[in-house]
Amino acid sequence: MPESSLIGSRIRERRSLVGQRQAELAKAVGISPSYLNLIEHNKRKIGGKLLIDIAQELEVDVALLSQGAEANLAASLRHASDDWPDIDAEVERIDEFAGRFPGWAQLVTKSHDQVLKLERVVETLSDRMAYDPLLSKSMHEVLSAVTAIHSTSSILSENKEIGPEWQARFLRNINEDSARLAESAQSLVQFLDAGNDNPAAISTPQQEIEQFLGGQGYHFPELETLRGDPEALVEGNEALQTTAARKQALQILEQYSEDAAKVPLESIRSAIQIHGIEPSKLTNIFQASAGTVLRRIAVMPEDVLKADIGLVVCDAPGNLQFHRKLQGFGSRRFMATRAQWPLFEALSRPMQPIRRTVEVPDYEFQKFECFAVAEPINTVSFDDVPIYAAYMLIVPSSYYQQDD
Amino acid sequence: MGKRVLLIEDEPNIIEAISFILSRDGWDVATHSNGHTAVDAIREREPDVIILDVMLPGRSGYEILGDIRADGNTSVLPVLMLTARGQAKDREMAEAAGASMFMTKPFSNADVLNAVNELVA
C-alpha cells in the first residue's frame, strides 16, 4: 500500500493521541463526522486545504500526516524538541541524527508521544478528582470522620484526668465515627475501583452534560420557540447515561427556554450583529439580568458570534462545569489561571457583574475577556434564602481588538 | 468570663470535641449547626471569634462569610474557616470571601487552639 493511502490512519492515530473526539475535529474543520470517519478509515482521499486544516487542528506538521512518522522522523523529533525548549537539543543536526540512529530517533519520538498520551490521562483524572461531586462528597465524609476521631482520641490520650462520664461519651463518639469512616472509606474504594479498566474513558455526570451540550453545538433551535419541550430533548439522548446528568440537563434546558422567552433569538442575533459580544450593552437593550444575557450569548450559533467563546458555571460549593467549551479551554494551562478568574469573586459579591482580562501563559490567544456574575437560581421569597450560581463568559481578547 | 467563640459546624462529634478543648482553655463556647440561621446566631451571640465550616446544611460557609463581611458590625470579626478539601481553589475562595485564617481537616486540637488564640491576640 502506498504511503499516501494511509493518511487517514495517521489522522486517526494523531487525533486519539491528543484526545480529541471525531465529532470535535470534524466540526473544527467544517466537515461531517461521518465524512471524517470515512477519511480516517482510508476510504476517502484527502489533501489540499482540508489536510492542512486538520494538521493545524491536531497541531502537527502536514508532512507528518501525508508522509507518515517513519518517513518524517525529523518532524517528530522537532516536535519533541519544541516541547522541551530548555533542553537545547541540536535541532540543526536533526537529519543527521535521524539518519545515523533511526532506532534511537524512533525511541525518542515514541517516548515523547507516550508522554503526551499519559499527560492527557493524568489531566483527565486530576480534573475528575477536582470536580467530581460524588468523589468530593465521599472525601468530605472520610475527612469529617477522621477529623472527629483524631480530635476526640487526642483528648482522651492527653487528658488522663477527665471524668468517667466524659470518657464514656468520647469513647462512644469514636466508636460511632469509626463505623462511619469504615462505611465511607468503602464507598470511596468502590468509586475508585469502578475506573480500573480505562480511567480516561469513564464519564462523570458533568462530562456527560458537557458532551450533550457540545454534541448539539450548544444551540437548541427547538427551544427558541415558545413550544419548546426540554423533556423531549433529554429523553433518549445517548450522551446522557446517568440519572444525575439527565436531571441536570433538564434544568439547564428549562433555563434555556425561560431565557429564550426573555431574549428572543431574532432580537439578540441582530443586536450582536450591530454591537458585537457586549454583555453590558445587551443587558441594557433587553432589560434582562446579566446572567440571562451571558447564558443567551453562550447558546448562540457560531455564525452569529463570529468567535469561539466559552461559558463556565460555578455552583455555591465551588463545583465547576463547562456549558460551552472554547478551544483549549479546560486544558491544564487554562485551569492554572483560575486564581485570576472573576468567577469566584462574583460568587462572593452576588448580582455584581465583574469583567476582567485573564492572561494564559503560552496560549495561542494569550488573553481572554471574562465576564462574570452570580445570580440566585431559586425563586427568592421572604421564607427562602437565595442559592447562587455564578456564570462566566469567556471571549478571546483578540475579538475586541478586531473591532477597534 | 473568657472570650466568646462561636463554632458553626454540623458534625456533632467534631462539635463536642472542639467545644471540650476550647472550654478547657477558658473559652466561652457557643455552637450552631444550621447554615440558614448562622448569621442570626452571630448577631445574637456577638462572639469575639468565629470558627466556620465550609460545608453546612442549607448554605455554604463562603456565603455566610460574605454576609459577615458585608455587615458593618461584623466586618472585621476574626473568622477561622474549616474545610475538608485543601485544594488551591478552596483556599482562593476562602481568601476571596474574606477568611482571616484557613484550616484543612483533619487538624489537630492544638492547631485549632493556637489559631483562635492568635486571632484574638
Image (tube, helix red, strand yellow):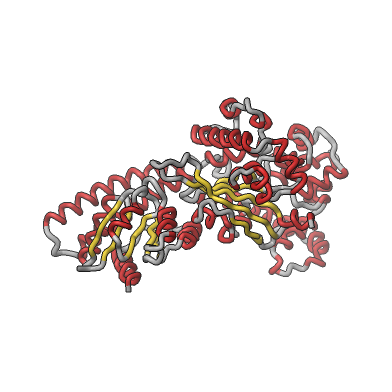
- Report which quarter residue A361 is drawn in: bottom right
Q: Is residue A334 left or right of residue B70?
A: right
Q: Is residue A129 visible?
A: no
Q: Is residue A67 left or right of residue A127?
A: right
Whether A74 is drawn above or below A259: the answer is below
Residue at (79% x, 58% y) in the render: A404
Q: Is residue B69 left or right of residue A127?
A: left
Residue at (23% x, 63% y) in the render: B28
- Report which quarter residue A4 is drawn in: top right
Residue at (73% x, 69% y) in the render: A88
Give whichever of A182, A275 is nearer the camera. A275
- Report which quarter residue A201 is drawn in: top right
Give whichever of A401, A245 is nearer the camera. A401
Residue reaching furthest to the bottom: B121
Residue at (65% x, 53% y) in the render: A116
Residue reaching furthest to the right: A48
Give whichever of A292, B58 is nearer the camera. A292
Whether A197 is drawn above or below B7: the answer is above
Count of all numbered marks drawn on residues in the image: 0
Quadrant of the snapshot with the N terminus of chain A: top right
Q: Position of residue A238 (x, y in %)?
A: 60, 30
Q: Is residue A386 left or right of residue A322?
A: left
Q: Position of residue A70 (x, y in %)?
A: 79, 51
Whether A48 is drawn above or below A336: the answer is above
Q: Position of residue A401 (x, y in %)?
A: 77, 58
Q: Is residue B76 visible?
A: yes
Q: Position of residue A333 (x, y in %)?
A: 63, 58
